[in-house]
Image (cartoon, rainbow, N blue to C red):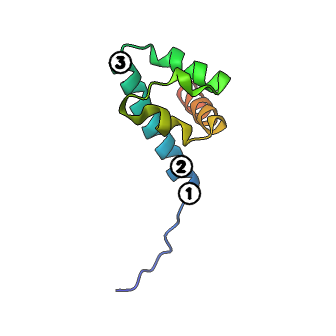
Amino acid sequence: MPQEQTSLFDIQEIDTERTRVTLKEVFEALEERGYNPTNQIVGYLISGDPGYISSYKDSRNKIQEIDRAKIVEILLTEFQKNNK
């Protein structure tokens, strides 16, 4: 059965969704360990020091796989969407 329409592959959207999922997982893991996730993630984003992120549930490794600038970009984009 031939397809009549070309499928589009948007790598940026996939990358953005992967980042969202990772941030959610890291946030929840930090919360479970009793940390203030917002403060810890902000500390990491500003300094680049992975010591701000617990290794619980592999959170430190997960967040280091994503460029910090990409995380900031996504957070600002989401902020803009929610505040229009």
Give the x, y percent position of residue 75. 57, 30
Q: Real-space Cα distance between discs 3 and 2?
A: 27 Å
- Quarter of the image with the C terminus is top right
Give the x, y percent position of residue 18. 47, 45
Instruction: Kindly identify the amino acid type of the residue bearing the numbered disc 3.
Output: Arg
Left or right, 50 with respect to 69, comes to left
Mark closest to the chain's N terminus, 3 or 1: 1
Number of on-image labels: 3
Residue at figure coordinates x 58%, y 36% from the top left: 74
Give the x, y percent position of residue 41. 53, 23
Q: Nearer the viewer, residue 71 or 64?
A: 64
Mark 1 nearby-residue class (10 Å; few <14, some 14–19, many ≥20):
few
Residue at figure coordinates x 57%, y 41% from the top left: 66
Label for residue 15?
A: 2
Left or right, 31 with respect to 47, comes to left
Q: Element type at marker 1? A: helix
Instruction: Kindly identify the amino acid type of the residue bearing the numbered disc 2.
Output: Asp
Q: Which of the two discs, 3 and 1, sits closer to the camera?
A: 3
Left or right, 25 with respect to 70, comes to left
- Looking at the image, can residue 24 be seen? no
Which residue is denoted by mark 3 in the rendering?
33
Q: Nearer the viewer, residue 58 or 68?
A: 58
Name the outermost residue toward the bottom: 1
Label for residue 11?
A: 1
Residue at figure coordinates x 39%, y 33% from the top left: 25
- Quarter of the image with the N terminus is bottom left
